Amino acid sequence: MSLESVLESVRVRLSRKPTGLTSSLKTSRTLRSRRGTPEGAYKGQYPVFRSVLSEAGDSNGDGRQRIDGTVEDQRPARSSYEPGNPIADEDGFVYMSNVNSVQEMASMMAASRSYQTNIEVMNTAKDLLMRTLTIGQQ
């Protein structure tokens, strides 16, 4: 694998990480929002990635992906019995987001670690290139 392909692979991976973090942050901000109907409660939104073959048309396993859109979490909204709440439905239930806070936190941590790893790969490739250039100067 050439240095150019390593750097291009890292560039592609780094370009998609903000999407995963952004959707996790947006989803986690809605954890405490409450609505009077299950349909009105926020449903988690998650990005969908698809693999893309390289420009040469061969699949060399470089892991290139593109964002293909988002999907909505299909789990039902969580309900809480709060008959005194002004937004409660006629049965006294208030509906909250179907987002699992622990799952979202784990997702954000994984995306952050992956981003950090890709930065380290980029720095290592840069250091190797700089060492190669200094060998040529001696």
Image: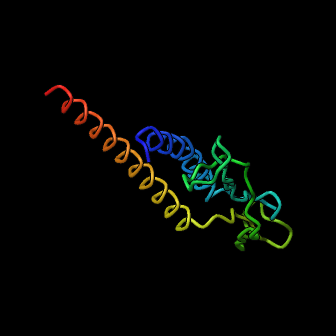
Residue at 74% in and 70% down: 75
> Which quarter shows the C terminus?
top left
Residue 136 picture location, percent across and down: 21, 29
Residue sitting at 50 percent across and 45 percent down? 9
Q: Residue at x 56, y 56 (%)?
A: 61
- Is residue 86 found left or right of 46 in the rendered image? right
Left or right of 39? Residue 130 is: left
Left or right position of 37 against 110: right
Give the camera-side residue of 97 and 50.
Answer: 50
Say above or below: 101 vs 22: below
Question: Compared with residue 5, is residue 89 higher up or lower down, i.e. above or below?
Answer: below
Residue 105 point in image, percent of width and height: 50, 61
Pinpoint residue 11: horizontal percent, then vertical percent.
Answer: 49, 40
- Horizontal and vertical percent position of residue 125: 34, 42
**What is the count of numbered marks?**
0
Q: Residue furthest top?
A: 137
Figure coloring: rainbow
Residue at the left extreme of this rendering: 138
Q: Which image quarter: residue 72?
A: bottom right
For the residue pair 59 and 83, the one nearer the viewer reads as 59
Against 92, is 129 above or below? above
Which residue is at the front of the view, 96 or 81? 96
